[in-house]
Amino acid sequence: MKTILTWYGHATLGLNVGEHKLLIDPFFTGNPVASMSADEAKADFILVTHGHGDHIGDTIDIAKRENALIISNFEIAEWLAAQGFQTHGQQLGGGFNHPFGYLKLTLALHGSALPDGSYGGNPAGLLLTTPNGKKIYMAGDTGLFGDMQLIGNESIDLAVIPIGDNYTMGPDDALTAVKLLRPKVVVPIHYNTWPLIEQDPHAWKARVETETNTKVVVLKPGESLELNE
Ligand code: NI
Ligand code: MN
């Protein structure tokens, strides 16, 4: 079973788990670094970490076209269900066995207001255990928190974390995050979308690989990474 992560720029991710196509935080329209348009996006499931516009993004249009199930926190799930979408709501610390694996929502230190000002519940990270036992942690938008140590105790194969600073962890705290998470591989995201979150991912890679045993994979928007079997 193949597991393939694609970064479409900013915090927009594709994750193919075997035959299942997942989109995470699908922000294409208005995303200056998006490697494709929302029209081209395919999804069986759309996972939304929090309510901000650069994460909920094109969820509505893509879910409508693709007839995708939207998975998010309970408040965002209810907000979308009221607009006629198929949703599955979870809450922080709660996991559920979906067809693509066991998905748990994790703590994220951030906000989650929806684009129309509605209350968007708590922002979340995503911890996925695939059917063949791979652990993938997608931190969402978050600052550094000590409980990343507990997430790290689960033996993370792949972590996807923000490094942009200003709205999320910057490079220094993201390096500390890697030390707590101890993943085999880490992919940095949520940087270089706008001048406010400009970072040098290669300088960060050099620091992480000097100070930890984790391998850093710097993707360009549109590039993919296949997890080893
Ligand atoms: Ni945000
Ligand atoms: Mn964001």
Image (cartoon, rainbow, N blue to C red):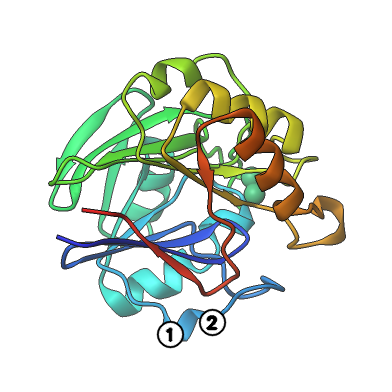
Q: In the image, which disc is placed on residue 40? A: 1
Task: Give the image location of residue 42, x and y in percent.
Answer: 34, 76
- Find out whether the residues at labels 2 and 1 contact each other: C-beta distance under 8 Å: yes
Would you say residue 109 is visible in this rendering? Answer: no
| Label 2 neighbour load within 10 Å: few <14, some 14-19, many 20+ | some
- Tag 2 secondary structure: loop
Task: Give the image location of residue 148, x and y in percent.
Answer: 49, 21
Lateral position of residue 94 relative to residue 83, left or right: left
**Which of the pair 117/9 is nearer the observer?**
9
| Label 1 neighbour load within 10 Å: few <14, some 14-19, many 20+ | few
At x 60%, y 40%, the residue is 141
Lateral position of residue 59 relative to residue 145, left or right: left
Would you say residue 225 is visible in this rendering? Answer: yes
Task: Give the image location of residue 155, x and y in percent.
Answer: 32, 27
Task: Give the image location of residue 7, x and y in percent.
Answer: 51, 64
Q: Amino acid at mark 1?
A: Glu
Name the quarter where the N terminus is drawn.
Answer: bottom left
At x 13%, y 52%, the residue is 99
Decide: is 63 above or below 86: below
Q: Amino acid at mark 2?
A: Met
The residue at label 1 has a CB less than 8 Å from ligand 2 = no
- Tag 1 secondary structure: helix
Residue matched to label 2 = 36
Decide: is 117 above or below 146: below
**Which of the pair 225/118 is nearer the observer?**
225
Q: In the rendered image, which quarter is residue 90 located in?
A: top left
Task: Measure how far apart labels 2 and 1 are at the Cα level.
Answer: 7 Å
Q: In the rendered image, which quarter is residue 130 located in?
A: top left
Decide: is 147 above or below 22: above
Lateral position of residue 199 relative to residue 114, left or right: right
At x 32%, y 53%, the residue is 81
